[in-house]
Amino acid sequence: MSPRRSYDQYCSAARALDVVGDRWTLLIVRELLAGPRRYTDLHADLPGVSTDVLASRLKDMERDGLVSRRRLPPPGAASVYELTGRGRELLPVLQALSGWGRAELGERRPTDALRAHWFALPLLHSLDGSGLVEVRLEEGDFHLYVGAEDGPVYGDGPAPGEPDARLVVDADACVAVAQGELSLLDAVRDGRVTVTGEGALAKALRED
């Protein structure tokens, strides 16, 4: 394993970038906020990363205490990577970066990959309270653990169990919310987001 490069500056921002400033590192954190992931699943949801670079980044992140690796018991019998407590502390960093990057989204380019769950962070930022929310897009379904303090903050596919709210969103509305051009509440009022469910989150979205 190659030694970690350093800015050699006695500054907390520089020290943080020593750990997370390499290309792909924060996007790996984004994927692991969904909970434990196998290497093959990470590679599939990080289009553009080579297998060598992904393996190298994961080793660096293990060394730096951001992720840990464990073996699932049979019948899974596969190794998975998951965030440590230290790695999970990067959630507000990614949320702030996602908010700052709204102005950079612009129009989707023909070469831009897209995964439905990449909208998880912008939508989490738009929801108050706590509970399980299922989001349905044409590109796929995912679910959010709003207000979660431990464990995953989102996941692929339908919600495991009955969600507090279900949102049916078209991609254009989701992009508008992600870009900060439209609030989630306004999208509901305008009929661009359909909300069902009897949980507090669903009632708040319908009544506000």
Image (cartoon, helix red, strand yellow):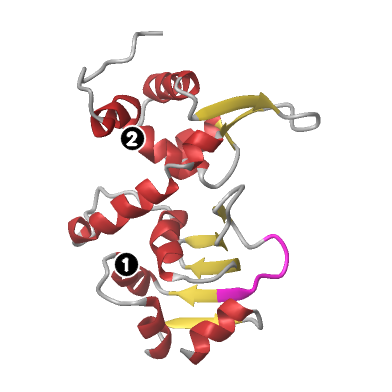
Q: How many marks?
A: 2
Q: Looking at this rendering, what residue extends furthest in the right direction?
A: 74
In this rendering, is residue 139 above or below 169?
above
Task: In the rendered structure, find residue 175 and report the number of the disc placed on it.
Answer: 1
The residue lying toward the viewer, choosing from 14 and 77, is 14
Residue 47 visible within the image: no
**Mark 2 and mark 1: span between their CA atoms?**
22 Å
User: What x and y, as percent, mark residue 53?
Assistant: 37, 22
| Image point (57%, 81%), residue name | 202
Q: Looking at this rendering, what residue extends furthest in the front direction?
A: 10
| Image point (49%, 71%), residue name | 128
Q: Is residue 48 magenta?
A: no
| Image point (58%, 49%), residue name | 152
Task: In the rendered structure, find residue 48 and report the number of the disc placed on it.
Answer: 2
User: What amino acid is labelled 1 in the image?
Assistant: Val
User: What x and y, as percent, mark residue 98?
Assistant: 31, 54
In this rendering, is residue 23 above or below 194?
above
User: What x and y, as percent, mark residue 185?
Assistant: 40, 82
The residue lying toward the viewer, choosing from 164 and 111, is 164
Residue 128 visible within the image: yes
